[in-house]
Image: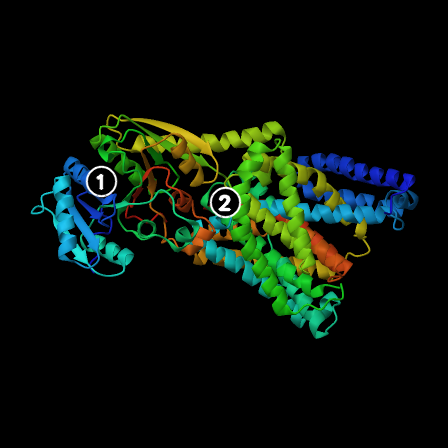
Amino acid sequence: MDLSKLKNRPSYPFETIAVALSFSPQCKFILLEAKRIADLLGSTLLLLHIGTKSREKENELEVLMTNAGVNGNLIRVIWMEGEPVDTILKLCKLNIVDLLILGALQKENLLKFYIGSIARNISRKAKCSILLVSKPFVALIELKKIIINGVENPKTIHTLNTALYLANHLKVEEVTIVNEVDVPGLTMAIADDSTAPQAKEIKKNITEVKTENLNALINKCNKGNIIIKDKFIKGKVGYAISKYAKDKQADLLVINSPDTNLTLFDRIFTHDIEYILANLPCNLLIIHSRISSR
Amino acid sequence: MVKLAHDELIVLLLAISTMLIVSRIFAELGKRIKLTVVMGELIVGIILGPTILGMACPQLFNYLFPSTGNVPIALDGIFSLSVIMLLFVAGMEVQLPLVFKQGKVAIYTSIFSMIIPFATGFAVAWYFPEIFSVSSEKNTKLLFALFLGTALSISALPVIARILMDMGIFQTNVGMLIIASAMFNDLIGWLIFSLVLSLTNNSGEHMSLGYTVLSIIGFGIFMLTIGKKIIDKTLPWMQTKLSWPGGVLSISLGICLLSAAFTQSINIHAILGAFIAGIAFGDSVHLREQAREIIHQFVTNFFAPLFFVSIGLKVNFITNFDITIVSIILLLAFIGKVLGASLGARLGGMSKNNSLAVGFGMNARGAMEIILGTLALNAGLISPPIFVALVFMALITSLTSGPLMKKFIEKC
């Protein structure tokens, strides 16, 4: 597989958008929204189905496409058999997909969480950006409340620019960049020999440094006409932003892709992103910037 | 039920108040000359113990800290409770996901900073036991070698965190790498040490190595998966439905003691139960920052001084000072840790100077080393001269860690 075209490919514009079709009840909505987004961004739409191709399924797809206003002559549909996660990931790489749209349950039972569902396993391994649609009743092109994770990471500037590119096309007026403040070992370091003002000063300095870094990041990004608000929240990284997005009833949460392929180990010793995947607070956009964070 | 006599209760209260007040005064004075609080408390122990007070005023020493009657039993109970609490809060700060999040460099640094000091300590103890006056009988030698390896490979997370903060590099790549690797060292170190203590168990019950290892692993897995989930589910309820912060404080400390009692009952030392309960508790996303701070403050300002002062009460630091043992342990500590951690960081892709800074940063042993040494001394695993050498090593590595790290970080 020639992956040279993928390397260093910018995370936006979304030239090719793929939709993983599962023929679930959500599928109709997801296809409709994917079509609307593709039209808005001028993207090529690609439909993927992993499973046996049959006359019955073809008819079902035709009905779905007609309802979504998708012209079957203008888009490609790929049918392939195989293990769903690996096959979808392979097809995305082969077809230089920039954004893969998938339906996902908001929450899965404990066993399924540890074993991993198709949508979540794709999110953990994908080499392209992923949009997990968990709220089929919210029209994607009418998103209003977008929250972006402003974690300190080289990937974040790409995530921010990609989210702003999308927000600009969706005519969103305001986005919130959230930075989680969680310093491991801090409590221990100040517990025994800091006076109350010293402890307060230490915490204040940490927030000030984070604010400076976030402001520098915001100044570097392509804002357009969008108003960017920043917000600092305390708590465990991943969990805190997920809770914030839920509390604020956000329509879309945008985060960086994980730095490495996540495994079962990352679910036991919970990785930041796993807190979000465990209980999706809203629709989730994972931006793969195709650069290494290290 | 045996009760403390009227006079015994007075002595007990006087002893505890003396330890708390004098150690606080020394800790505050020590801060002015950049001495850690633990070191100040340790010095108070030496002053109040047989080393100084026992020599200068034996009547007062024997009155405050009698060696017979019910007072020493009561004090021993308090000291045991203190070490359990200390391990609980140490566990609360361990965040294993941090190690994996830091990637290759953290994994290499964690592993090498553990393996090389362990191998160095083990090899010297195994091949030259006579240096430490340890019997060359195979089992005794093996246990001592395992202990020395562990003692040299452990790090002191609280001291390291404080040094990094004072240097203003807490949140840099180097700082987070050191913190993550020290957390990993602590976890593995305490697991191995629990194994060594279980094998040293003098309760008379014979424990097979396989049973002990399986018990430790089984308990660890249970607490970090199912135990953690239970804590995670009940914490929000505790923090909202019970009185605040009393509810969460009593339940968390109760869980710590329950877990410690369980590990003690299956013949693994109580400290492991407390440490693992601390990890499960501290890792909960629902644990409020304020609750974490309250637990830390309570333990580090009440139990920690009692424990660290008690160390000086047990051993005469002058008569047990052996320059040969101190020098060898100090040398092994520096070589093993600095070499191991630097090599790991270098292999993980860090620059030469930053790798050395990581090595010297992780060399600080501090409180953890002293706790480990005390438990080993109580278990009869080491002699007082080795314990004294470990305390000196902890003191010197903690004092030199910051300046040496600074020297290399500045060059970058």
Badge 2 sits on which subunit? B
Task: Report, in whole angstroms, how far the alpha carbon at label 1 lies from the one at label 2.
Answer: 48 Å
Amino acid, disc 1: Phe
Tell me the residue at 70%/55% (across/down).
B373
SS under mark 1 = helix
Which residue matches tag 1?
A: A29
Q: Residues within 10 Å of mark 1 (few under 14, many from 20)?
A: many
Residue picked out by circle 2: B175
Measuring 39% from the left and 34% from the top, which residue is drawn there? A246
> Is residue A267 toward the left or the right of residue B47 in the image?
left
Q: Nearer the viewer, residue A79 or B175?
A: A79
> Going by the image, does B167 lie left or right of A24?
right
On the rendered structure, is A133 left or right of A15?
right
Q: Residue furthest front?
A: A56
In x, y percent, where is residue A166?
Answer: 24, 35
Q: Which residue is found at the position 39% from the left and 52% from the top? A: A112
Closer to us: B48 or A65: A65
Q: Is residue A108 above or below residue A81?
A: above
Image vertical order of residue B97 relative to residue A36, above or below: below
Does residue A178 lie above or below B319 as drawn? above
Give, as a three-letter code, the residue at label 2: Gly
Residue B291 placed where, x, y %?
A: 59, 35
